Image (cartoon, grey):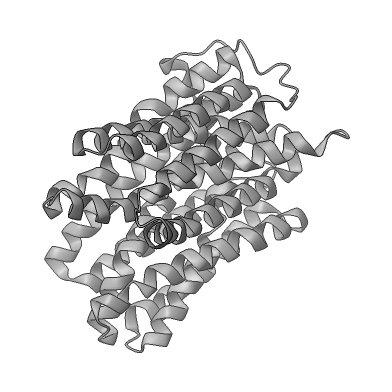
Amino acid sequence: MKTKRNIIPVIAVFFGFFIMGFVDVVGIATNYVKIDFNLSNSLANTLPMIVFLWFALFSIPAGILMGKIGRKNTVLISLAITALAMIIPFFIYSFAWVLVAFALLGISNTILQVSLNPLVASMFNKDKTASVLSTGQFIKSISSLSGPIIVGFSALYFENWRFTFLIFSAISLLSVLLLGTSKIDESGNINQQSSFGTVVALLKNRYVLYSFLGIVLIVGLDVGINTSAPQLLMSRAGMEISRAGLGSSVYFIAKTIGTFLGAFLLLKTKPLMFLRVSMVIAMLSFVPLVLGTNMWVLLIAIFLIGLTCANVFSILFSLALNRVTDRANEISALMIMGVSGGAVILPLQGVVNDAFGLIASLLVLLACLVLILILTKNLKENA
């Protein structure tokens, strides 16, 4: 850390990453909402889209707001909105209010991701940025993995799965209190004048542009693998649909382990070199993924891809932050907007799947890795 400080502010800020993971409850909640309101598949599938739509719409406004009121205050606003979003479907359970709640959750999560990453990065030395952000992603992964467990616990113990929302709302309020009472030095981070035009203009910087495109690609791969893994296990290994979800679980577990290891390894290795090696291993892992027909071979390939891709987002984010340190708020907004841009990869993969088959669609994801490696070849380690 830059200076000796109380550990409470550090805990308070990292606790925000746990709240950040609450957005993933939308996935399992959608299944319950679909049954409760007898929704069609197409209508139910719009629920996750409602959440991620806001990454495109609110990222830059959140960055501009952060420059005016400060990172900590912006994080507090996002946590408060999360608490509100979570409590709504517990007390008012109708399809319309579920839509409102999920929209608020998407808005709050966007604001949280834009503001929390630069806030926590500013509390540590520059050379630790990639490691610090990977630690945050590890905590977020733990939260994401705990979501289905909490939903199951609520359904069994309280005989009402919606108690999940009450639990999440209470945890969000606790995070507000913890961060609100913590003193964090934000000198120089407030009153940074910016606009939509000045934020987008940062893409003229190749480090920022390449990092942004890299995040678009890695998020696309992330969504693509998560979607394709069960299909691959069913078509190539003959698994039943009830067991094929194991592929997604293995992928998320690998990402959790990867971010945990990355938090330590990135303290000892150069982030860009770490990224390049990871990309090469991930690309090689596509060989058994594409050619394999044995369940264990496919699961190991999925695991390796998840493990090696776990820290890509954190490294690319840190590259951009460290390159333009005086515009960290705007940089964060652009990087998070790239998360929504990843949605363009999944439709492209779907088109290729329909035209040429599942294996061909996996090559779209392999191309994402190749492009990331090419982009990073043009960057210097001291970015």
Q: Is residue 357 above or below residue 131?
A: below
Q: Can residue 378 be seen at all in this image of the molecule?
A: no
Q: Quadrant of residue 104?
A: top left
Q: How many marks?
A: 0
Q: Quadrant of residue 365?
A: bottom left
For this rendering, which residue is in front, 55 or 154?
Answer: 154
Quadrant into which the C terminus falls = top right
- Left or right, 61 with respect to 313, comes to left
Q: Can residue 12 be seen at all in this image of the molecule?
A: yes
- Left or right, 353 with respect to 253, comes to left
For this rendering, which residue is in front, 220 or 81?
Answer: 81
Q: Is residue 123 above or below residue 163?
A: above
Q: Is residue 15 above or below residue 203?
A: below
Residue 124 x, y percent position in the rendering: 76, 37
In percent of the image, x 59 and y 63: which residue is there? 258
In percent of the image, x 40 and y 61: which residue is there? 152
Residue 313 x, y percent position in the rendering: 52, 49
In percent of the image, x 59 and y 13: which residue is there? 192
Residue 76 x, y percent position in the rendering: 57, 26
| Residue at far bottom of view | 294
